[in-house]
Image: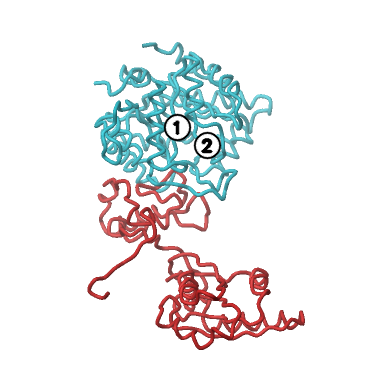
Chain colours: A red, B cyan
Amino acid sequence: MITAERKSMEELINCVSPYRRLLLVGCNECVTVCSAGGRKEVALLSSALQLHFMKEGKPFEIKEITLERQCDPEYVEELVAHIDSADAVLSMACGCGVQEIARRFKEKPVMPAVNTKFMGASERQGVWAERCAGCGDCVLGLTGGVCPIARCSKQLMNGPCGGSTKGKCEVDPEIDCAWQLIWDRLKALGMTEKYEENMPAKDWRTGRGAGPRKIVREDLA
Amino acid sequence: MMKTDSTLEKILASGQLAVTSECGPPRGALPEKVKEKAEMLRGCVDAVNVTDNQTAMVRMSSLAACILIKQMGLNPLLQMVTRDRNRLAMQSEVLGAYSHGIDNMLCLSGDHPHFGDHPGAAAVHDIDSVQAVEMVKKMRDEGLFQGGQKIDGPPKMFIGAAANPFADPFELRVARLAKKVKAGVDFIQTQCIYNVDKFEKWMQGIVDRGLHEKVYILAGITPMKSVGMAKYMKNKVPGMDVPDELIKRIGGVPKENQAEEGIKMCLETIERLKTVKGVAGFHIMAIEWEHRVREIVERAGLLPRPTF
């Protein structure tokens, strides 16, 4: 999933304070799963903002709505009924959702309420970790199912570097050394000979190297 | 057959133990600082490694300092990290270096920006150190850029890389070296060796696979100046293996004698490593202690240096 974290109250208050009527929009997809911008977080943020402006004695109206999927024009269309009664939109979706609203409602200011972080997985309750860098040319089949690009701090394709210590990365003992994980997996799979096949320099055009990417499926388009 | 005109290659090919050392460029634009340090190494080493923004701190560029050292009639060795440059910048730097007669280089991934004075910098890592070796070899042997186009006047670099036998997992450290050999590396300079037993075990693995016949291995030596430095190396430097008895030994002599004890310890290490099969020379990294390198090389019986 795409993970996100809500911005600080201070930053949010600062960015919404020029407006009197706010439309607060959550998303029922990834940000709901990572507890950053689903229905529940929308309600919490809404209360906190109302409380703040009430204390300040400032007139402030907020309307809450959580869309099924904010990155999908079909669902964003549901905002048509509410957009005119708002001065601005505060989106709790990932950056894709924020941009979809901005694209659809050109005259309306849209602000992000969360910082979009990474594509990751849940490690345990309340902990998410980066897993995929979206390089567009997946090598997981060669690396025992552990991504060196997303998970090695130096994105080494032929690691580990000399800083791997007791399975941890030199950058932070909280980070697992991706190449230790890769090696352990290759051993478990009886595929250690794969390790000595040098991986060639990556063609980053499949990633961000060739500018913003697009998928066009002729069979669906 | 020689691959380059590098003096370092000639010395290694002759079977004599090679000696290299390093010169860290200054944190400013003063050429005298480079010259002062490099001058201390004249006549006692075969090549002077010039570090490349080591510990991720901004310094005078390795290439610029290499040129200054070359102009002094010494033999510089260009270190290049993949952290700060993409493949275009790296290749143009290799061309520039060779155009100034610099014909040794070391391909490294580099310390993470996290450790330096610009922790917010983006690390490039377009390619890694193994791929960098491959790229420079292709430039030299095939006369082609990494992208496949022909080079008008290919650079004939003697290509080095680093190895840390003490990092984890130990069991794949020989295989990691094998990857660099496969990529076409000519020589290796190792991480500082304090745990000689472990180093010997690694070398045995190298020799068992015959890798020592394909690559020259220069053993990394860093003299300890004090017990404080020994403890710092043990606890703060990632991938460093400093046995406790070593700390006990240097800590067991009075403060004013610790530097001499450190040098004695490094000389003992050199003596022992001379007998280890596959060791082709020594890389003496005397950090901010360049003025003691001559003495170490001399007392290790490695003077005078051969000339070609």
Q: Which residue is mark 1?
A: B79
Q: Which residue is mark 2?
A: B54
Side (left or right) of B298 relative to B28? left
Q: Amino acid at mark 2?
A: Gln
Q: Residue furthest bottom?
A: A81
**SS assignment at label 2:** helix
Q: Position of residue B203 (x, y in %)?
A: 35, 34
> Quick check: B306 above or below B18?
above
Image quadrant of residue B27? top right
Front-most of A221 and A97?
A221
Q: Amino acid at mark 1?
A: Gln
> Quick check: A180 above or below B297?
below
Residue drawn 50% across and 40% down? B240
**Label 1 vs 2, first from the N-terminus:** 2
User: What crowding class fits label 1: few (fewer than 14 Cα within 10 Å), some (14-19), or many (20 or more)?
Assistant: many
Dots 1 and 2: beta carbons under 8 Å? Answer: yes
The span from disc 1 to disc 2 (Cα, nearest Å) is 10 Å
